[in-house]
Amino acid sequence: MPENELAEITQLDLDELLLDEENPRLLESTARDQQSMLDYIAASTSIEELMGAIANNDYFAGEPIIVVPHETIEGKFVVVEGNRRLTALRLLQDPEACSNPGNKIREIANQAKYKPTRIPVVKKATRALVLPYLGFRHITGIKQWEPLAKARYIKQIFDLTDPANEPRDRYYEVAKVIGSRRDHIKRSLDALAVYRKIENENFYDIENLDEESIKFSILSTALADDRIGFFVGMSRKDGTGNFISNDPIVFPECLLNEPVSELTHWLYEKIKGKTKVGESRNLRMLAAVVSDEKALAAFRSDSPLKIAFEMTSDITQDFMALLYQADSLVTEAASMVATIDYSSEAQTVSKRIFENIRLIGREMVEKLRAAEDEF
């Protein structure tokens, strides 16, 4: 949204403003009445810091709240951008507006130098006119939302596109609106589609896993690998083995319940404090495992991920990468050896490297003999 479209600033009373039921940052489980939304924002954000800033310095006119007329309530406006600020302003007026105000909230309100009741706003006719601005501000801008909130916002933009168009074209249209890339938009929406299935299945009854605790970014990163996406049904393969998207945000029925359940348990269920996948850097190993029948069967039978990965062809690629890396480093060290003084530590490390090289060489010879014996 061009800046000049936000230039017409007016003033409204606080009692004319309503919190937004479609705020992407709200939990799905948060009731959409004004009290519940205010309570959630007050409890889940650093509301005291914002209250303190306004109480000491007054409301900054350069940050107008952006509103649209309420569809059914005459004279009321929905705050599409600025729900946290509206919450802070209401609590400055009356800390008891929150169902469970803390002592800090009461203290800030009681000692406030400023308690503005009329604030600057920008009125827009429809939500659709505001959403592009939110994209620049919270998706690609400096005040970025958390990944799940971003995905929900992107879905709001996506829903404004023509459903008769191809999904690929709709992704591109969203990307143009918020100044992002089509593949980034699709990645967020793919992950959101899988997340929604997980949510609809009550997070597969995994203990302590819910909308607040789940790390959406891990799910999104995992699904960005085509092999994991294919595993859960996000895509299919053509005759040459290329992946073709099933566009799950449009066709959620393409997602496979059992694989989605397995992936959710592997990523999030903790046994003795650890998940089966472990660190996010292990997602590449998981992608190799789910695309290899033998390795996947072993992993499903409770083999550790590393052991299952060693049954895939990717382990050979890793082995060669390490060899090339070692070769490069040893060659560089060899070019320096003439310029350094004797070191017993360097000699010990050199002997260890030499023994490991001999071990690898012997193993390669044995594998060659075994391969020749098969003929």
Image (cartoon, rainbow, N blue to C red):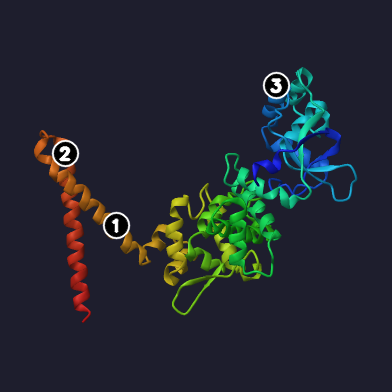
Counting residues from the start of the chain, the first of labels 3 and 2 encountered is 3
Element on which disc 3 rests: helix
Does residue 28 appear in the picture of this structure?
no
- Is 346 rendered above or below residue 317? above
Q: Amino acid at mark 1?
A: Ala
- Residue furthest bottom as drawn: 375
Residue that label 2 marks: 346
- Looking at the rendered image, the quarter that the C terminus falls into is bottom left
Which residue is tagged 1?
321
| Relative side of 142 to 286, left or right | right
Report the number of discs: 3
CA separation in Å, label 3 and label 2 = 63 Å
Q: Residues within 10 Å of mark 3 (few under 14, many from 20)?
A: few
- Of tags 3 and 2, the one toward the viewer is 3
Q: Position of residue 101 (x, y in %)?
A: 77, 30
Q: Nearer the viewer, residue 259 or 191?
A: 191
In the foreground, 226 or 8:
8
Mark 2: amino acid: Ala
Q: Quadrant of residue 36?
A: top right
Q: Nearer the viewer, mark 1 or mark 3?
A: 3
Residue 362 in view here: yes
Classify 10 Å Cα crowding around label 1: few (below 14), some (14-19), many (20 and above): few
Disc 2 packing (10 Å; few <14; some 14–19; many ≥20): few
Secondary structure, mark 2, is: helix
The residue tagged 3 is 57
Question: What secondary structure is found at the residue carrying circle 1?
Answer: helix
| Left or right: where 313 falls relative to 357 | right
Q: Look at label 3 and name its amino acid.
A: Asn
Residue projecting furthest to the left: 338
Seen from the viewer's position, the closer of residues 210 and 240 is 240
In this rendering, is residue 372 above or below 73? below
